């Protein structure tokens, strides 16, 4: 089975986390989200994937060319964004059998084998994974009938005008013949144009309600939320024993005798923690981290190659790659970005 990742968006709502990274490459527990998604797909027997890229396409291609990920990857880069439907159409040549499409900013435990089996059982043209949220107006809202087929699809209705709290979870199974219905060489939104047109023309869109965890990491709040959910055990990650040991990865790590680590904490490689530092709970310490003395770090996500001076306090914050935080600085509810050197209140 093959899969297509829609990975060309600008990630504007996730800024400044996406100032130097495309959204699919933003790290979730120390590893790019897209890499985590590929790992999960391999488990389901998907061995060929297509990345539809645009914004910072090279970052994606370089990363996945640099080592072996156990799947065959093709890249289709857009010079001008084609929208979600245009991007799907642009990759049509790769797909001549039932295939899976993903938005690239999703963390979920949707069982893809089960979803594909459901799609076939329903003899649907398209199957959309659906989940329930409290604020459906930020998403594609789906109404469906008693047989599990969609009756309406409304992308981001005005607040108060949502007809359902079931939303598009950004995972689709497509029959390739549907690709013939998407126009070529122009911007198309699969959500605003293609899905409503399919319904109007009598095509069958099945609604799959599987999985117990779902979030998109489209905003800094949700980026922090997924980490909180992993730390609490609500969202599972494959790293061995992380949830039982509460501390992950202590190889090549120097922790001063007087420092304290309060789990859960996730460590990358080559980390050096100074005297009288307290790390945790709920901290991701990226690879190459270095700290001075007497720092207190909790409920935060530190990307790779962050260094902090002495007496620094970081709480409920994200510190992006390569940042240097001077001694004595207090960071709370902040996204600390190297480029802008500014603190944004989340
Ligand atoms: N190649 C390409 N070209 N990819 C694109 C383009 C484009 O022009 N525009 C967006 N994408 C990719 C994004 O990178 C992302 O992975 C995916 O398509 C969806 O775009 P978002 O910008 O994240 O959309 P959204 O979050 O506002 O809404 C979508 O996701 C919701 C679930 O999180 C919609 O599909 C909603 O219906 C859905 O509920
Ligand atoms: Mg999104």
Image: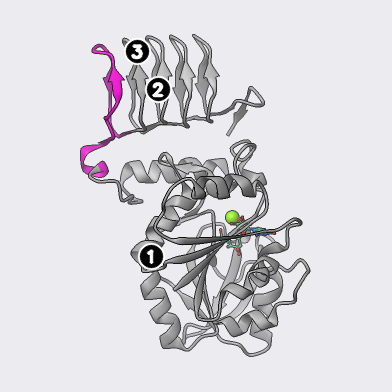
Q: Residue at x 34, y 27 (%)?
A: 280
In primary-sequence order, the first of circles 1 and 3 is 1
Q: Quadrant of residue 19?
A: top right
Q: Mark 2, residues whose alpha carbon is within 10 Å: few (<14), some, or many (≥20)?
A: many
Spatial CA span between label 1 and label 3: 42 Å
Q: Can residue 262 be found in the magenta stretch?
A: yes
In primary-sequence order, the first of circles 2 and 1 is 1
- SS at circle 2: strand
The answer as to whether callout 1 falls within 8 Å of ligand 1 is no
Residue 295 or 323: which is nearer the viewer?
323
Q: Is residue 27 left or right of residue 218?
A: left
**Foreground: disc 1 or disc 3:** 3
Q: Is residue 218 shown to the viewer in this render?
A: no
Is 245 drawn above or below residue 106 in the view shown?
A: above
Disc 2 target residue: 297
Query: What segment is highlighted magenta in the picture?
Result: 242-266
In primary-sequence order, the first of circles 2 and 3 is 3
The quadrant of the picture showing ligand 1 is bottom right
Q: Is residue 37 left or right of residue 335?
A: left
**Foreground: disc 2 or disc 3:** 3
Q: Mark 3, residues whose alpha carbon is within 10 Å: few (<14), some, or many (≥20)?
A: many
Disc sitting over residue 274 in the figure: 3
Look at the image and tell me in which quarter the N terminus lies. bottom left
Q: Residue at x 68, y 76 (%)?
A: 194
Q: Is residue 296 shown to the viewer in this render?
A: yes
């Amino acid at each position: 089975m093959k899969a297509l990742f829609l990975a060309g968006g600008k990630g504007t709502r996730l800024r400044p986390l996406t100032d130097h990274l495309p959204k699919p490459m933003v790290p979730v527990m120390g590893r790019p989200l897209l890499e985590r998604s590929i790992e999960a797909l391999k488990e389901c027997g998907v061995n060929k994937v297509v990345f539809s890229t645009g914004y910072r396409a090279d970052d994606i291609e370089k990363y996945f060319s640099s080592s072996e990920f156990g799947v065959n990857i093709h890249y289709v880069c857009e010079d001008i964004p084609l929208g979600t439907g245009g991007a799907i159409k642009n990759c049509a040549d790769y797909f001549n059998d039932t295939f899976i499409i993903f938005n690239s900013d999703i963390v979920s435990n949707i069982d893809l084998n089960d979803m594909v089996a459901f799609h076939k059982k329903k003899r649907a043209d398209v199957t959309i994974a659906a989940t329930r949220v409290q604020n459906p107006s930020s998403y594609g809202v789906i109404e469906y009938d008693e047989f599990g087929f969609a009756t309406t699809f409304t992308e981001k209705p005005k607040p108060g005008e949502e007809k359902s709290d079931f939303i598009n979870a950004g995972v689709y199974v497509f029959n390739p013949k549907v690709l013939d219905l998407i126009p070529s060489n122009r911007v198309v939104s699969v959500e605003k144009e293609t899905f409503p047109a399919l319904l109007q023309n009598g095509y069958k869109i099945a609604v799959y309600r599987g999985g117990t965890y779902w979030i998109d990491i489209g905003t800094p709040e949700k980026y922090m939320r997924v980490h909180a959910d992993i730390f609490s055990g609500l969202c599972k990650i494959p790293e061995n024993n992380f949830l039982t040991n509460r501390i992950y990865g202590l190889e090549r790590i120097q922790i001063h005798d007087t420092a304290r680590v309060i789990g859960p904490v996730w460590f990358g490689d080559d980390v050096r923690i100074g005297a009288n530092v307290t790390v945790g709970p709920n901290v991701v310490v990226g690879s190459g981290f270095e700290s001075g003395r007497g720092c207190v770090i909790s409920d935060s996500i530190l990307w790779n190659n962050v260094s902090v001076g002495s007496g620094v306090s970081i709480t409920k914050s994200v510190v992006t790659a390569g940042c240097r935080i001077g001694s004595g600085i207090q960071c709370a509810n902040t996204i600390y970005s190297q480029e802008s050197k500014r603190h944004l209140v989340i």
